[in-house]
Image: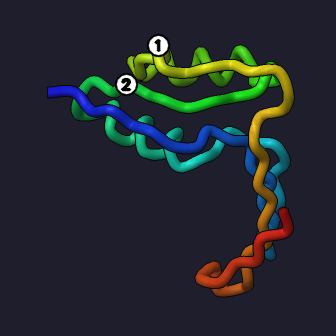
Amino acid sequence: MSLLVVGSVAYDSIITPQAAADEVLGGSATFFATAASHFTPVNLVAVVGDDFHHQDIAFLKDRRVSLEGLQTVPGKTFRWKGRYSENMNDRETIY
């Protein structure tokens, strides 16, 4: 059995009280596909911009995620930036 994952592939910038990370690979489809790939073949359907990094494609391929459904379009890949509270349960979306 294989899975079809449809969702966002993005670059996240995250601020926590302990540290910050800018432009890291994120998105719900990325997280789900990466986790599921440990158990079954995964086919990913998503759209990224022409700025999507080759090393991030390699990351997914190394986990045997099929990228036949990954479409690259002119423009930027979706971005999300958020700040997490001290307890890490609450967050604020900045953009």
Q: What residue does disc 1 label?
A: 68
Q: In which quarter of the image is the N terminus?
A: top left
Describe the element under mark 2 as helix, strand or loop: strand
* Helix, strand or loop under label 1: strand
Figure quadrant of the C terminus: bottom right
Nearer to us in this view, 12 or 76: 76
Give residue 87's quadrant in the image. Answer: bottom right
Q: In this view, does 27 lie to the left or right of 93?
A: left
Q: Quadrant of residue 75?
A: top right
Q: Which amino acid does label 2 sit on?
A: Asn
Image coords of residue 46 (percent x, y) = 55, 32
> What residue sits right under mark 2 in the picture?
43
85 versus 81 height, above or below: below
Residue 93: x and y in percent read 77, 71
Q: Residue at x 84, y 32 (%)?
A: 76
Relative horizontal placement of residue 94, taking residue 6 as reference (left or right): right
Q: Is residue 58 above or below residue 80?
A: above
Residue visible at 74% across and 21% down in the picture: 73
